[in-house]
Image (cartoon, rainbow, N blue to C red):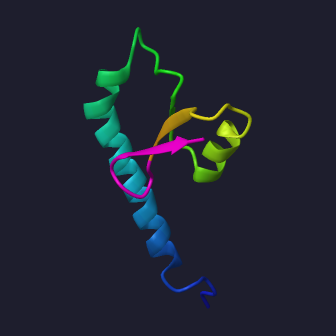
Amino acid sequence: MDHSQPGGDVQESTESRLRELALKWFTETQAPLILHNGNFPEWFQGFISRKDAEEHLKDKELGCFLIRLSDKATGYILSYK
């Protein structure tokens, strides 16, 4: 008998697929635009959670920011203090 939550596997599969598509979009169309000598700028953090972004900015001065990739949509998220 399956005791998993209804739709749990479907939601995880959908989120995984969205992240995969976002990574493909970024790698193919965006990375070449922001890479400098093979490195990403310090402000670009890739796939990190909102909580991780907040932690990263916690001790920074006002006005500091980072850009991260969304794993729920194809695009960027600006996190700032």
User: Residue shown at 61%/43% (left/top)?
Assistant: 53
Horizontal side of residue 56 vs 24, given as left or right: right
Above or below — where is 21 with respect to 15?
above
Q: Name the residue at the left extreme.
A: 29
**Quarter-wise, where is residue 33 in the image?**
top left
Quadrant assignment for the N terminus: bottom right
Q: How many marks?
A: 0
Horizontal side of residue 40 vs 51, given as left or right: left
Which one is nearer the viewer's eye here, 36 or 2?
36
Magenta-colored span: 70-81
Task: Point out residue 19 in the picture as x, y percentages from the top left corner.
Answer: 42, 52
Task: Point out residue 48 in the picture as x, y percentages from the top left corner.
Answer: 56, 44
Above or below — where is 20 with respect to 58?
below
Q: Name the residue at the right extreme.
A: 59
Task: Point out residue 5 in the picture as x, y percentages from the top left corner.
Answer: 58, 84
Quadrant assignment for the C terminus: top right
Which one is nearer the viewer's eye here, 77 or 26?
77
**Is residue 75 found inside the magenta-colored segment of the image?**
yes
Above or below — where is 68 with respect to 9?
above
